[in-house]
Amino acid sequence: MNYSSLYLAELTDQIIPFWQKHSIDKVNGGFFTCIDEQHQVFDTDKFIWLQCRQVWMFGTFYEKIKPNKEWLDIAENGADFLLKKGHDGNFNWYFSLDQQGNPTIEPYNIFSYTFACLAFSKMFTITKNEKYKEAFEKTFEQIEKRKNNPKGKWNKSISKNRPLKNFALPMILCNLYTEVGTLIPLEIKKQNIELCVFEILNHFWINDKKVLVENTTLEGNYSDTFEGRLVNPGHGLEALWFIMDLGVNYQRKDWINESVDKALLLIEKGWDSLHGGIYYFLDTEGHPPQQLEWDQKLWWVHLEAMICFLKGFELTQKNECLDWFKRIHDYTWNHFRDHINKGEWYGYLNRRGEVLLPLKGGKWKGCFHVPRALLKLHEIALRLSI
Amino acid sequence: MNYSSLYLAELTDQIIPFWQKHSIDKVNGGFFTCIDEQHQVFDTDKFIWLQCRQVWMFGTFYEKIKPNKEWLDIAENGADFLLKKGHDGNFNWYFSLDQQGNPTIEPYNIFSYTFACLAFSKMFTITKNEKYKEAFEKTFEQIEKRKNNPKGKWNKSISKNRPLKNFALPMILCNLYTEVGTLIPLEIKKQNIELCVFEILNHFWINDKKVLVENTTLEGNYSDTFEGRLVNPGHGLEALWFIMDLGVNYQRKDWINESVDKALLLIEKGWDSLHGGIYYFLDTEGHPPQQLEWDQKLWWVHLEAMICFLKGFELTQKNECLDWFKRIHDYTWNHFRDHINKGEWYGYLNRRGEVLLPLKGGKWKGCFHVPRALLKLHEIALRLSI
């Protein structure tokens, strides 16, 4: 098996053409993402997370694969739609828009902002157009303002009675700091990265449970509540490869080793030994989780896990990493790839690995995890000559 | 098969003793609801919906089965805990509390208010204590204030760009108006009931799709959006038996006939012909729903469907109703009842009918749908001598 050419062929023959052909709204700008298994658009709403991610992704194809003008045009189409319709005039990013770009859901979600930063930093990198730099900077200011109470007035938790902090924001910031290059001053970046990495490896990692949890107390202690017991193995594995990248950039071999060790422990908990694949959610104590979808198999979980273990193998040469990579590759390739209709992959399988939602894209699945993973896996496999 | 005695025995031998034995917090007041299949409490948070419903339920046992002082004490324990800890002093009802009764989730959910009304109207009926009447009245005033924008500041939808109305509130009000007796003046009740029933049977019923949808435009037209295409068959069947009850109380034979006809159409769409049972969510157009749990089988859906069809049979003598009742009874009794550990039933099965969450109660499942259905089904079956 030559992984490196397999992934590149899948990316350039199937995934990129799928999004090029089916997702572009030539009338209104922006992208459709709700696309069924026959490759028909079944809903025209536009979700800001996914608009941003597709801009970043096509910008990345242009930057990393080849300077194809069509890809740049697609990225610019999305970026300009976002600038015109995606925010309230003050770079507060809505959650979703209708097809014409009228906002339908308020800017309650801070990850719309972080993915906007991802998109505009990439656009600035490849075009050097100052409007993208400005959009990045204004949005980043808003994140700074909101990061201590990300949900703002939409927060339903009464924090004084149950003060918890959430894993997702430091995790996403780890990736953002890697991606933004020189748009954030080096010293500020370094301080923030050290803080985020420390929180993830120490506060969110629960030593006696051998898992990363989604929420802890403000001091970084375990909270025996539904929120505090919640484990999302895919989220954890994705964060751990973000930290491996930071370990490389900042010459922190200790971060790399710790991430790899933790990933190997986490996958033991997350793997479904009966049906294969990685669970979506678990409870640290083995109690029933609140999430009814807990036993489902999601595309992004598996792709992020593949990156985590192949990167871990490249950086540490641990054979356990390669074994896990291969096992997860086999499951993912056999179950998520659509061997009949081709194009983009399925996203949602039931516990047994059967297709649960016959879609290629939806409210939460766009042009992002499959192509990002295929590109990263191709690059790593090429370096490893596998 | 003698349904009437089967249901009464299950209720009095299994379900009531389960909640009496395992759910009472004798130290702090109120009820535990997160109880696993070994009948152990696995989380101590207190959810206002479920606190209210258990008060209503034990009050109903006391009123309808026998005046057992222990049941009254349990209802009073819950009601007094609610009065002391459940609201903000102005009868704005929190969504959840910790074990000691400190609020952890803000009063964002109007159904905490409607279920509080249900609880306090029952407590007033059985005790005649004025404090419960006052709690009912103050809470009802808050519902009136909030009903045009139930989510208040927590509303994330930008209604001016996508004005939709939701099915759940008129549906729950139909039941509340039936339950509150004379606590709301007859004329006001009648006007509101006519409005709610009209909305459900005309606006939320989509004629050419033969389903009730969860959201429509303000004028009651179909909205081809994720929200407007969403069908929750169990929700619909529950609303239809609420309307049958109103049909009996207000001598509206037309409401009864229309509800029964619609229920028979709705169950044809909702039934899973491959694995049996009723789907949790569907999309009117057959597109993939947003809800990852769409194909799961939930206890309350099946119990409400049983009430709907047995009541429909009693009121119209249509054999199709009896056939559907028997089919759903067989599925429900075989799959949701816990034939090994006994006590309360399971709540969440996967599409194949296997237990998905090994719990008897949780954040959304308390002492309500199983006992309410067993009691109502027992009463109807007794009148039918089946």
Image (cartoon, coloured by chain):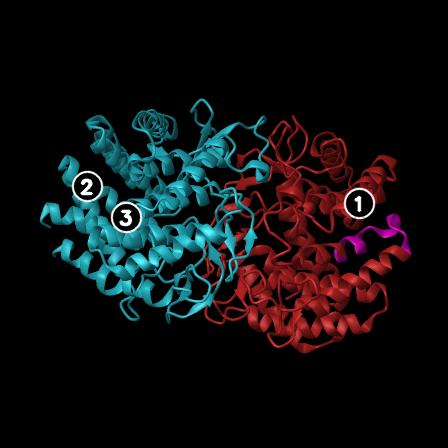
Chain colours: A red, B cyan
| Contact (Cβ within 8 Å) of mark 3 with mark 1 | no
Q: CA distance from mark 3 to mark 1?
A: 59 Å
Instruction: Name the chain under label 2.
Output: B
Q: Residue at x 51, y 48 (%)?
A: B94
Residue named by callout 2: B321
In this picture, which residue range is highlighted in magenta? A174-186
Q: CA distance from mark 2 to mark 1?
A: 60 Å
Side of A204 where B55 appears, left or right: left
Q: CA distance from mark 2 to mark 3?
A: 34 Å
Residue named by callout 3: B126
Instruction: Name the chain under label 1.
Output: A
Q: Residue at x 62, y 45 (%)?
A: A366
Say which amino acid is labelled 3: Ile
Side of B136 where A14 appears, left or right: right
Q: Residue at x 40, y 50 (%)?
A: B52
Where residue A365 sits: x, y (%)?
59, 47
Asked whether residue B144 is drawn in magenta, I would say no
Where residue A62 sits: x, y (%)?
78, 44
Q: Answer with the quarter of the image where residue A333 lies.
A: bottom right
Eyeballing the image, is A109 above or below A316? above
Residue B276 visible somewhere in the drawing: no
Q: Residues within 10 Å of mark 3 (few under 14, many from 20)?
A: some
Where residue B73 sits: x, y (%)?
32, 59
Q: Secondary structure at mark 2?
A: helix
Q: Secondary structure at mark 3?
A: helix
